[in-house]
Amino acid sequence: MGEMNKKAAIVGLGYVGIPLAELFLKGGWEVFGIDVDAGKIESLLKHRSYLSDYTDEEIKGLFSRGLFHPGTSYEVISKVDTVILCIPTPLTPDHKPDLTFLKKALAGCVPFLQKDQLMILESSTYPGTTEEVLCPEIGACGFTLGKDYYAAYSPERIDPGNKVYSLHQIPKVIGGMTEECTRRAAEAYGSIFDSIVPVSSPRAAEMCKLVENSQRLINISFMNELLLLSSKLDLDLWEVIDAAGTKPFGFTPYYPGPGIGGHCIPVDPMYLLWKAEQSELNLSLIKEAHRINEAMPHYVISKIEKLTGSGTIKGKCIFIIGAAYKKNVNDARESSALKIMDLLLKKGAKIQYHDPYIPELQVNGYTLETIDLTEDVLSRADLTLIHTNHSSLDYETIAQFSNCILDTRHVLELANPKVNYL
């Protein structure tokens, strides 16, 4: 790919699209960012960050070379050689794949496609999406694959909040519809990533992402199930896991928690499960892991009921610390905190929460706003629930002024008589 035609359009400027845009910009590419959320575009143009991994100054830095052009119009597609789709692929209420956003994005792109362009899908999805959804949409406008356009799939592998691995260091898996499609995608990504991992097809690349996150769901759910047994046996499961982790081979530590959340681990295995059902297969292990994960917020509620002493939490004040699905991110999607809050409200509890990353939440029809973490708030609560272990939290104050603590993340010393683990 020559120096003069390094132009890319990135559709979707969220936690995947912005880091990818930054990487292409650093590689000397001109980047046209597209997002239908006008608020995001306004924030970018005013150099205001809406992502926890980016400061306002870092957003400003995206514009330093004069090569970044964010907007809401798809017309810019006609100016580029590479189009990358980073679109949300959530689940329907009954846990089926929801490709509504992806199909709308494709419909926006198609009128402005030019011959010889490379189309890459990065959104997590079931094996076959590139072949069965993306390519037919483009083919419907008269373009022939491998002649008029090229298509590939490359799963996003971003871990928000991870300070150990930079995006360019994470190997880039690529599967093209043809060998030439793979070659072109590898050439584009090879200009910005340290390592390229070509696979035989988009289906293989799509499956790769689902396998990665399904494995994590299964392993964490296994630890959550062992947590129930350890509680019965009066064992500290974290101690057991740390001891097992000293084995130099054959064991990888995973830790229990209040329930897995986020945009990937609770979602991606359901895409795999759905695809298996289309093939009349029953992936019972994933089903059971999903069931265990869905049950964890109920287990947390049962612990709260025991710790409040009366066996009921009606009228009790529960102060929840951390609503994000993981520490140091401003993302509450699929967070178990939302499910725990909903259950608490339904049982008549009074709830408040503190999260420096999540200013506002919608729970059970109510709008909740974060409140300051103060000695007074802690001392007035019947129980403090540590849900998300953000690094910036004042754990010393939490430990000192709370009346009773349920620590789901194992961040406080159990020697403190106020502290209880899951």
Image (tube, rainbow, N blue to C red):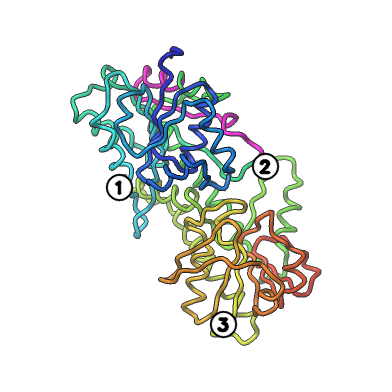
State yes or no: residue 74 in magenta.
no
Provide the residue designation for mark 2: 250
Q: Residues within 10 Å of mark 3 (few under 14, many from 20)?
A: many
How far from the left and from the top, in percent, is residue 260? 54, 56
Side of 127 relative to 361 (left or right): left
Q: Quadrant for residue 377, please give it.
A: bottom right
User: In this picture, is 138 found above or below 292?
Assistant: above
Q: Earlier in the sequence, mark 2 or mark 3?
A: 2
Q: Residue 313 got which mark?
A: 3
Type of the residue with mark 1: Thr
For numbered disc 2, what is the local secondary structure? loop
Dot 3: what SS? loop
Asked which quadrant contains residue 388, the reply is bottom right
For mark 1, what is the residue?
Answer: 100
Residue 45 horizontal/vertical position (percent): 46, 39
Indicate the quadrant containing the N terminus: top left, top right, bottom left or bottom right: top left
On screen, residue 369 versus residue 267, left or right, reads: right
* Residue 272 located left or right of residue 359: left
Q: Which residues are magenta?
A: 164-186
| C-alpha gap between disc 1 and disc 3 | 40 Å
Q: Is residue 181 magenta?
A: yes
Q: Quadrant of residue 241?
A: bottom right
